[in-house]
Amino acid sequence: MANKKIVIVGSGIAGVSAAEAARKNDNEAEIVIYSADTDLPFYRLRIAEVLKDPANAEKLYLHPASWYEERRIKLMPGVNVVGLDCQDQKLALDNNEVVAWDRLILASGSRSFILPLKGFDRENCFSLWSLADARKFAAAIREHNLQTCAIIGGGLLGLEAAWQLIQAGLKVKILEFAPSLMARQLDPRASELVRQYVESLGITVLLSADSEEILGKDSTGPVTGIVLKDGRSVDCDCILMSVGVRANTEVAAEAGLDIGRRIKVNTAMVTSCPQVFAAGDVSEVDEDGFWFGLWSISMNQGKIAGANATGAQLHFEKTVPPYVVNTLNTRIVSQGDLPQEEGAGYRFEITEDAENYSYKKLVYKDDQLVGFILLGDYAKEMVSLQKKL
Ligand SMILES: Cc1cc2nc3c(=O)[nH]c(=O)nc-3n(C[C@H](O)[C@H](O)[C@H](O)COP(=O)(O)OP(=O)(O)OC[C@H]3O[C@@H](n4cnc5c(N)ncnc54)[C@H](O)[C@@H]3O)c2cc1C
C-alpha cells in the first residue's frame, strides 16, 4: 500500500509544527506544505524587527532549508491553495495543479484586517503580517525617507511596530480607537500608566481616535496625514494599519466545512470532515469558539493536528494563557479574573511605582488569588504569581 500523503496548508508555526509532529510519528508518510508565504517559515511575532533593520529578516527563519530536507518535509512556498474537495480528497492550487491527499491540515492562519478607510490605497500605507509586508515597509522607509508614521491601532502589534519604528529613527503617533490603551486587558490606572510610559519614549498617543480619511498630495498622491472623525488631524508620511486580524477561512468555507468566526474543530483538531484537521489562528475549538491568536497555542495545536493526522489520539487542553506584551523595553502582563470593582467576594491589592511606570494589581476572590495585572518591574513576578492562580 502507498504511504499516507499528509498535505498541510500554511507554513506558519501551526503548519510547521504539524509537519514536524507528523514526521516524528510516521517515518514513511509523504508530507507536503503549500504556503502563500514566499519565505522560508519565520518567527512571525518578530517581523517588526525588520522595520528597524532590514538585515534582521534573514535572522527570523525558524530553520534553514536543510532542516525540511532532512525530515523529508516538502516545502512549497509561494503556492496558494484555492479550492478544496473533501469528498474526493483533492486540493486545487493557484498554478492550476490538483493534488490528492489522505489527511489534510488547514493551518492557513490570519491576515491583517484592513478598515475600509478612504485613502488607504495611497502610497506609503502598510499593514504587517508577513515577512514580505515587513520588507516592503522597511524598503519604503529608506527609499522614500519616511519620517513620521501614524499607527492605526494601539494593541500588541501596534506597540511592537511603534518600538521598532522609533528605533529606526521615525516619529510615531499611535491612534487608538478606544478611550484607553489595552482596555480589555488592563484596568484604567494600568492603561494610563502604559500611556504615560509610551509617551515618555517620545511616541504620541491619541485616544478615542476614530479615523475618517487618509490625506495625501493631490487626489492620489502619497500620504500626508490623517483626519479623525472628531475633526482632529495628524501629520504623517506613512500609515500602518494594525487593527486586528481576519482568519483565512475562505477555502474551507467554500468546501462546506463548519465555520464560526474560524474553522470549527474538536479538541483533536478535527474539522467537520473527519479526514481534515485545522490548527492555529485559523481554527476555533469546540462550541465555545476557544481562540486567542497566540504563537504558543498555534504551535501546540499544530503538533496535535500533525500527530493525529498520522493516527495518534492527542487532545488540546484549553487553558487561558496570560496576555503578555514584551516590547518597548518593558513588560505588560494580565491574567485571570479581573473584575472592574471590589465587592461580591473580590478584593484588590494594588502596589504602584508611578515614577517607573510599574504597577501591580492582585485580585483575590474569597482570599484566593484569581487574577493580576503587572507592569514594568513587577512583571518579574509573573511566573511565581501564575503558580498561585
Ligand atoms: C508583528 C506581530 C507580533 C506578534 N506578537 C505576538 C506575541 O508577542 N505573542 C504571541 O503569542 N503572538 C504574537 N503574534 C501572533 C502570532 O504570530 C500568531 O498567532 C501566529 O503566527 C499564528 O500562527 P499560524 O501558523 O496559526 O498562522 P499564520 O502565522 O498566519 O500562518 C498562516 C500561513 O498560511 C499561509 N496561507 C494562508 N492562506 C493560504 C492559502 N490559501 N494557501 C496557502 N497558504 C496559505 C500563510 O501564507 C502563512 O504561511 C504576533 C503577530 C505579528 C504579525
Image: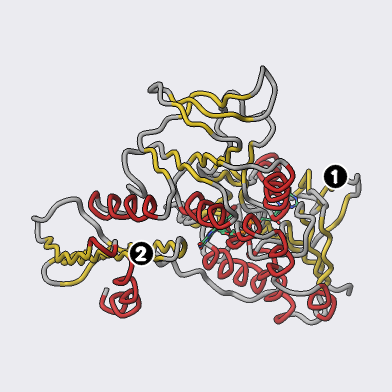
Badge 1: few (under 14), some or many (20 or more) residues near its Cα, within 10 Å? few
**Residue behind label 1 places its C-beta within 8 angstroms of ligand 1:** yes
Q: Residue at x 36, y 50 (%)?
A: 182
Discs 1/2, front: 2
**Residue behind label 2 places its C-beta within 8 angstroms of ligand 1:** no
Percent coordinates x, y for residue 190 in the rendering: 27, 55
Which quadrant of the figure has residue 149?
top right
Q: Residue at x 77, y 56 (%)?
A: 35
Q: How many marks?
A: 2
Percent coordinates x, y for residue 93 in the rendering: 84, 48
- Kind of residue sitting beneath label 2: Val
Q: In which quarter of the image is the N terminus?
A: bottom right
- Secondary-structure class at tag 1: loop
Return the residue at label 1: 94
Return the residue at label 2: 333
Percent coordinates x, y for residue 316 in the rendering: 51, 69
Badge 2: few (under 14), some or many (20 or more) residues near its Cα, within 10 Å? many
- Kind of residue sitting beneath label 1: Asp
Does residue 23 sit above or below 319 in this rendering? below
Which quadrant of the figure has residue 14?
bottom right
Does residue 240 sit above or below 71 in this rendering? above
Q: Nearer the viewer, residue 204 or 169?
A: 169
